[in-house]
Amino acid sequence: MEENRIYFARRAAEEEARATEAMDPHAADAHRQMQRAYLERASTGDRHGPREIVG
């Protein structure tokens, strides 16, 4: 859904701002990792199909 892509893009922008503002290098790194995860979710959007259950 387009709403999901917008949500994840918005969250990525928030994490980028938090990484820039963080005084602690470890916290900044954690925010950058979260930013990358949100960006990936925003870029893949609806391409993920339903999970296949095996077994």
Image (cartoon, helix red, strand yellow):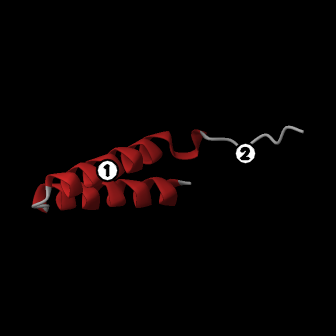
Front-lying residue, 28 or 51: 28
**Which residue is pictured at 59% across the width and 39% down the height?**
47
Which residue carries the number 1 mark? 35
Pointer 1: residues within 10 angstroms few (<14), some, or many (20+)?
many
Which residue in the structure is indicated by mark 2? 50
Drawn side of residue 9 relative to residue 28, left or right:
right
Q: At 15% across and 52% down in the image, what residue appears? A: 25
Q: Residue at x 26, y 48 (%)?
A: 32
In the image, 39 versus 28, the foreground residue is 28
What is the quadrant of the C terminus in the image?
Answer: top right
Give amino acid for label 1.
Answer: Gln
Q: Quadrant of residue 40?
A: top left
Dot 2 lies on which element? loop
Q: Is residue 26 left or right of residue 20?
A: right
In this rendering, the answer to whether 3 lies above or below 34 is: below
Q: In the drawing, does residue 27 fall left or right of residue 55?
A: left
Marks 1 and 2 in Cβ contact (< 8 Å): no
Relative depth, front residue between 29 and 42: 29
Q: Position of residue 7 (x, y in %)?
A: 42, 61
